[in-house]
Amino acid sequence: METEFTSNPTQEKEIDVVLHEIRKELENAHKGLLHLQDKLGDSMARAALGEDNHTQIARIKRRIGEIEETIQQAPLVIRGLKRLKTDNRS
């Protein structure tokens, strides 16, 4: 199912801005994911030694899930925006 969308130069610039923001968010998500995975490993090791609480582990896992969802959805949004931009040029 295709959505009809007519754009003008202003809308194309808006698409470019959104594309840039999404790419930057995706880059930050990858960096954040690595950091949180390290933090989760540390917290789980401390929990195994009885030094950490499981609430923090659950919080980190939840945040990792949110970041992974962002990483999965970003390419779909980027493809859709590119398609809108190119479809309207023809």
Image (cartoon, helix red, strand yellow):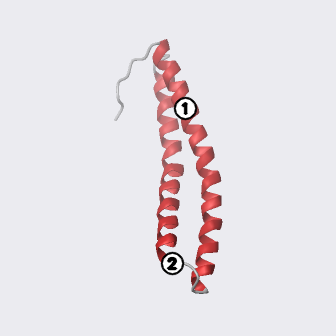
**Circle 1: is it few (<14), some (14-19), or many (20+) Cα within 10 Å?**
some
Looking at the rendered structure, the kind of residue marked 1 is Leu
Vertical order, 80 against 51 (above or below): above
Q: Position of residue 89 (x, y in %)?
A: 50, 16
Vertical side of 77 occupied by 60: above or below: below
Q: Are marks 1 and 2 in contact (CB under 8 Å)?
A: no
Q: Is residue 4 left or right of residue 36?
A: left
Mark 2 residue element? loop
Task: Report how far apart the C-alphas of labels 1 and 2 lie in the structure.
Answer: 40 Å
Residue furthest bottom as drawn = 49
Q: For this rendering, which residue is in front, 79 or 11? A: 11
Tag nearer the camera, 1 or 2 = 2
Indicate the quadrant where residue 47 lies: bottom right
Please provide percent x and percent y for residue 11: 46, 18
The residue pinned by badge 2 equals 53
Q: Nearer the viewer, residue 81 or 10?
A: 10
Label of residue 19 in the image = 1
Looking at the image, residue 31 sits to the left or right of residue 54; the answer is: right
